[in-house]
Amino acid sequence: MTPLNQGIGMTSQRTRERLIQRLRDEGVRDTRVLDSMRNTPRHMFVDEALASRAYEDTALPIGNGQTISQPYIVARMTEALIAEGPLENILEVGTGSGYQTAVLAPLVRRVYTVERIKVLLDQARRRFQALKIRNIVTKHTDGGMGLPEYAPFDGIIVTAAPEGIPLALVEQLRPGGRMVLPIGLRDQQALVRVHRTDDGYEHEMLERVSFVPLLGGVI
């Protein structure tokens, strides 16, 4: 696993620490998640014109109708994914800017991440290379179908919202594995954690959220 220990650049350590304190105030408790977000230079995952806003707790546009998620949501989803024990291999559906991927990378052995918009994936790949993160496998493909060739996964995280729980992704979890994703229509979405069982799955709602829709071949 590769720690992110790059310089702050134009953004001060004090600004980043304020974000971490805000996440604590909002209920994020896992020190592994907080440390990873402290060490991940979010300003490198947004356009230069928005870099001064990188450590605000808000979503920001990244082009192509997509956004980099609000830091609280990144922290909440990561915490929910790893809360029940360490994970080896995880699948991320929706690379986007690559920020969520980079936060996950120090916490697991390997992250497989898929993105359907090639220009975004190419940008994310360059960021991973610049940060020397070497445990990420990227693929340009329809995320709704996952990566069955690399399954089963210990965990799956989905960064766009299907209308319901995609069975094609559930089937790529190992028994005992879990998936964290938003589901529902844009104005009625919930963050859900799915647990794969021997004969199906169980799920629990965590909180209300708002994500872009997951497009493509979702089953």
Image (tube, grey):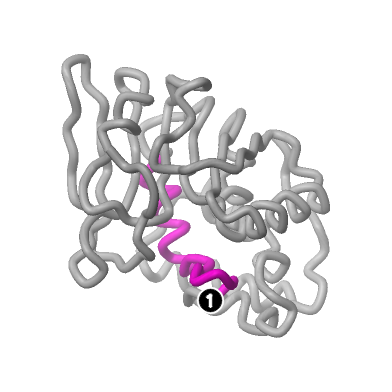
Q: Position of residue 79 (x, y in %)?
A: 41, 48
Residue 41 colored in magenta in the image: no
Q: Residue at x 62, y 82 (%)?
A: 53
**Left or right relative to 64: residue 197:** left
| Image position of 59 with respect to 129: above or below | below
Question: Considering depth in this image, is 141 or 192 the residue closer to the camera?
Answer: 141
Give the quadrant of the N terminus.
Answer: top right
Give the quadrant of the C terminus.
Answer: top left
Tell me which segment is drawn in magenta: 60-81
Q: Residue at x 69, y 79 (%)?
A: 51
Q: Quadrant of residue 76?
A: bottom left
Q: Which residue is mark 1?
A: 60
Label tally: 1
| Image position of 86 with respect to 205: above or below | above
Q: Amino acid at mark 1?
A: Leu
Residue 65 colored in magenta in the image: yes
Q: Position of residue 38 (x, y in %)?
A: 63, 60
Q: Residue at x 49, y 35 (%)?
A: 91
Q: Quadrant of residue 15?
A: bottom right
